[in-house]
Image: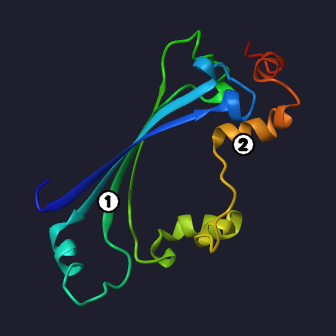
Amino acid sequence: MHDETVWTSDIPVRTNFGLTLGESFGLVNGVYAAQEMFDFYVDDREVAARTVAGTVPRGAMKTKISWSRTSPWAPFMCLPETGVRGQLTYHARSWSLPSYLDIEPWLRAEVDAAHPLYKAAPTEPGPSENSWTSFYNKQLGKGATTWADWCAANGRA
């Protein structure tokens, strides 16, 4: 790009929920297969300032990010990949800020009032959960009901 350093990271995601959870979610062979694609853009002047030998840069790198994901239908949609062709595409953009205090005041007020957990990054790693395992744990009661039965009970069969 013009006057920017750009790097990408394309990550194939593959998880066998049939094997790990015992639930296929209507996925082909119970396997969730997706693609996550990241593009990072940094102004060349920012790169130059952060690559001076013998110095340690201060603060967050000023970065713009583009993120995309293609994936099967979400589990709550009750669309079996084995029977309904298609996929979801997510796309988002973001940028870095020097600190939490630099977030737009209206958004910071909402986070402070309703979602204080997100005011800072975790200090320790936590358990790994994604939308599929969350659905399995919370909606299917950790396997107490099947995805097909949940879909039928919720008018989505």
**Label 1–label 2 contact, CB within 8 A:** no
**Circle 2 Cα neighbour tier, 10 Å, few/some/many (<14 / 14–19 / ≥20):** some
The residue positioned farthest toward the top in the image shown: 83
Instruction: Where is residue 119? Give x, y as percent.
Output: 60, 71
Under circle 2, the secondary element is: helix
Left or right for 142, reference 25: right
Left or right for 133, reference 31: right
The residue positioned farthest toward the front in the image shown: 19
Residue at x-position 17% and y-position 61%: 4
Residue at x-position 19% and y-position 61%: 5
Marks 1/2: CA–CA distance: 29 Å
**Circle 1 Cα neighbour tier, 10 Å, few/some/many (<14 / 14–19 / ≥20):** some
Left or right for 48, reference 80: left
Instruction: Where is residue 49? Give x, y as percent.
Output: 20, 80
Instruction: Where is residue 131? Give x, y as percent.
Output: 64, 41
Task: Give the residue type at disc 1.
Answer: Lys
Q: Which of marks 1 and 2 is nearer the N terminus?
A: 1
Q: Which of marks 1 and 2 is in front?
A: 2
The residue positioned farthest toward the bottom in the image shown: 54
Left or right for 131, reference 60: right
Q: How is the image coloured?
A: rainbow
Task: Give the residue type at disc 2.
Answer: Ser
Q: In which quarter of the image is residue 153?
A: top right
Residue at x-position 47% and y-position 68%: 104
Residue matched to label 1: 64
Tell me the number on the disc at residue 134.
2
Under circle 1, the secondary element is: strand
Instruction: Where is residue 42? Give x, y as percent.
Output: 24, 64
**Quadrant showing the C terminus:** top right
Residue placed most toward the observer, 108 or 53: 53
